[in-house]
Structure formats: structure tokens, C-alpha cells
Image: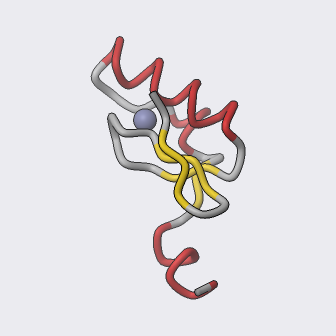
Amino acid sequence: MTKKIGDFHLCEECMLLYREQSWAEKCEEWCRERKSCNIEITKHAVPQNGLALSK
Ligand SMILES: [Zn+2]
């Protein structure tokens, strides 16, 4: 299950943040099944340093 953090959605498998829940869900599905990351999905993630700057 993805977790909502402020305006973002967290993939609890790889701890990446997404603006859109649909991407977070896709990521988590992939992470859980493949135990790896899909660049086509993770490129939609919010950069951790970008997040820090926006606060
Ligand atoms: Zn993930």
C-alpha cells in the first residue's frame, strides 16, 4: 500500500516519492514483484533534493 506524505505518495518498497498516486502504485507493484526499480517508472519520482528545496 502506498503512503500519502503531504502532497506526495510514497512507494514503501523503495521509498521513492511521487506526485501522482498512480505512479506510486505502479512503482510499488513493480518493486514488490521484481525487487528492482524500473527507470520508466522511477523517472516520474520526485527528486529527494528537489523536495528538500521546496520546503
Ligand atoms: Zn518503488
Please tell me whether residue 40 is drawn above or below residue 52 in the rendered image.
above
Please tell me whether residue 44 is drawn above or below residue 49 in the rendered image.
above
Q: Position of residue 43 (x, y in %)?
A: 60, 47
Q: Position of residue 38 (x, y in %)?
A: 48, 30
In the rendered view of the protein, which quadrant contains the C terminus? bottom right
Marker count (numbered): 0
In the rendered view of the protein, which quadrant contains the N terminus? top left
Q: Residue furthest top?
A: 33
Does residue 45 appear to the left or right of 37 in the view shown? Answer: right
Q: Position of residue 31 (x, y in %)?
A: 38, 25
Does residue 23 appear to the left or right of 11 in the view shown? Answer: right
Residue drawn at (52%, 37%), measured in percent from left and top? 39
| Rendering quarter of residue 50 | bottom right
Residue drawn at (61%, 33%), measured in percent from left and top? 40
The picture quadrant for ligand 1 comes to top left
| Rendering quarter of residue 46 | bottom right
Q: In terms of depth relative to the viewer, which is nearer, 43 or 22?
A: 22
Residue drawn at (40%, 32%), measured in percent from left and top? 37
Please tell me whether residue 32 is drawn above or below residue 6 in the rendered image.
above
Residue drawn at (68%, 52%), measured in percent from left and top? 19
Q: In terms of depth relative to the viewer, which is nearer, 35 or 19?
A: 19
- Way the structure is coloured: secondary structure
Please tell me whether residue 24 is drawn above or below residue 5 in the rendered image.
above
